Image (cartoon, rainbow, N blue to C red):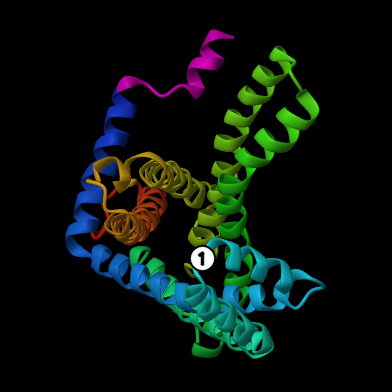
Amino acid sequence: MARGIDAFIPSRTALAESVQYYLRGLYRELSTKNVFLWAQAIAFKVLVTTVPIVILATGIVGRILQGNDAFTTVERFIRGLLPPTQSNELVSFLGQVESASGTIVGVGGIGLFLSAMSLFITLRIAVSNAFEQNWHEERPLLRGYLFDVRMVLQVGLLFLLTVGISVFLPSFFNNVIVQDLGGNIRWLKWLWNQSLYLTGLLLPFLITTAMFFQLYYLVPQPSPRKRSALSGALIASVLWEITKQAFTYYATYVGQFDQYSTGTEGLSALGNTFGLLVAFVFWVYFSSVVLMIGAVISSLHEHKHVTAGHLAGEEP
């Protein structure tokens, strides 16, 4: 029985050799392939995609304002909050957004689809380059575009899920479950807090792993073994969740320039916005680097088994 268990546990020598293989292979791949250049291209396309997202969100707000008494309620709130000159300008702007909301939603939706297509074309080429070996093939042009449409839907949905869960799940648990249902029951609050913490870590991690797995398994032709794609997806998911939590922590605690202000509220608000924009740009870039590192790890895992342990770029 003990021997059977030991068969599944790698020896220290095998573990050391495996770690050495991946470290050397990762260094070699990062040195010989334009991994960081492709990461920059992906980050740029992601930032471009945020423009139609903002347009689409503006149009959706306009559609909401067309609801019964919605615009009147917002107008009353704005006029009570701001001076007459500023409130009149803002109310006039919201009125224009409301009247043109249909066109704005259409333009934003089309722009988002086209920019997402462009992003996934870049993703497909970048991941294919990370997997580039002697046995890999390229997709025909038309099949490549059809594949990009498919990945926009599949990966885009998982991305929205993992980000949405990380953003909205904590507030939902705190406001709905704990306060409304838990009342003052101390043990229930503790139980839900622990459940929230574990769910908030595990569920986005699993969805992120599925997102990266699809990229690493479906993009290369022929597809690598599922174990190879999963190995890179797990590494990328761990690194991406770390970067996501770091950005969340910065946006929540560190990036508040109010704590450094000298009493000028305008400069403080400007500093908060600028700091968040810079942090967001860096997060997008590091996320792109993480995606490429995961692709390289998957490629090395597949290469190790296909060529019996030779490093990428070396003939067996």
Given residues 155 and 293, the one toward you in this image is 155
* Pointer 1 residue: 82
Given residues 82 and 36, the one toward you in this image is 82
Q: Quadrant of residue 99?
A: bottom right
Quadrant, the C terminus: bottom left
Given residues 240 and 249, the one toward you in this image is 249
Whether residue 216 is visible here, answered yes or no, is yes
- Mark 1: give few (<14), some (14-19) or many (20+) Cα within 10 Å: few
Residue at the extreme left of the image, as rendered: 31
**Picture coordinates of residue 53 (x, y %)?**
53, 74
Q: Residue at x 63, y 65 (%)?
A: 154
Q: Residue at x 27, y 33 (%)?
A: 17
Above or below, 77 relative to 105: above
Query: Number of numbered discs present?
Result: 1
Given residues 82 and 16, the one toward you in this image is 82
Residue at the extreme top of the image, as rendered: 2
Q: Residue at x 24, y 43 (%)?
A: 260
Residue 139 forms part of the magenta stretch: no
Above or below, 42 relative to 225: below
Residue at the extreme front of the image, as rendered: 84
Secondary structure at badge 1 equals loop
**Picture coordinates of residue 84 (x, y %)?**
52, 73
Q: Is residue 173 left or right of residue 273?
A: right
Q: Quadrant of residue 172?
A: top right
**Picture coordinates of residue 86 (x, y %)?**
48, 74
Above or below, 77 relative to 196: below
Predominant SS along the magenta part: helix
Per the rendered image, the range of residues in magenta is 1-12
Q: Name the kind of residue labelled 1 in the image.
A: Leu
Quadrant, the N terminus: top right
